[in-house]
Image (cartoon, rainbow, N blue to C red):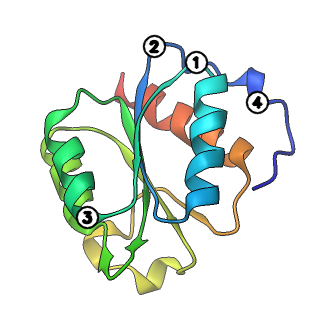
Amino acid sequence: MASNCDEAQVDLTGKRILIVEDEYYIASDLKRALQQAGASVVGPVGDLRRGLALAGQEPLDAAVLDVNLQESASFPIADALDRRSVPYMFLTGYDAWALPAAYAGAPRLIKPIGVDAVLSEVQSLIRQQK
């Protein structure tokens, strides 16, 4: 996962960000980048069960969700976040038309992604919540 801009430009100090990603290296890179931007990272977790538990219980400011988690999709996690009004974004290899209609409007980044794009999108999600 590459970074093309200065990650320090994004300030997520004090924000709690959930990462649900089953690819170890992507999850690790995201965690490092979010922590360097000042965020407290919840997770990362790579499966639906643990993702649902965290999405339903943890205080969160935003979430980054991989669409495909091993043998399941992360849509139930997105639903849990919606019920709590926690903004989220998807990481995926799918085009928007391949997502169920209920999630077609959700912010998404196409893999492979750069951490700078994720940081900017997370910051944007949090700003829109205010």
The residue to which callout 1 is attached is 38
Which residue type does callout 2 highlight?
A: Gly
Structural distance between the alpha carbons of marks 3 and 2: 26 Å
Residue found at x 32% / y 67%? 103
Which residue type does callout 4 highlight?
A: Glu
SS at mark 2? loop
The answer to whether 72 is drawn above or below residue 7 in the figure is below
Residue lying furthest top: 14
- Label of residue 14 in the image: 2
Which residue type does callout 3 highlight?
A: Leu
- Label of residue 93 in the image: none
Which residue type does callout 1 highlight?
A: Gly
Circles 4 and 3: CB distance less than 8 Å? Answer: no
Question: Quick check: 74 left or right of 128?
Answer: left
Crowding at dot 4, Cα within 10 Å, few <14 / some 14-19 / many 20+, comes out as: some
Give the mark nearer the N terminus: 4 vs 3. Answer: 4
The residue to which callout 3 is attached is 48
Q: Quadrant of the N terminus?
A: bottom right
Residue 96 in the image: x percent, y percent?
48, 77
Give the mark nearer the N terminus: 2 vs 1. Answer: 2
Give the mark nearer the N terminus: 2 vs 4. Answer: 4
Residue found at x 60% / y 45%? 30
Circles 2 and 1: CB distance less than 8 Å? Answer: yes
Q: Quadrant of residue 109?
A: bottom right
Q: Nearer the viewer, mark 3 or mark 2?
A: 3
Crowding at dot 1, Cα within 10 Å, few <14 / some 14-19 / many 20+, comes out as: some
Structural distance between the alpha carbons of marks 2 and 1: 6 Å
SS at mark 3? helix
The answer to whether 6 is drawn above or below residue 114 in the figure is above
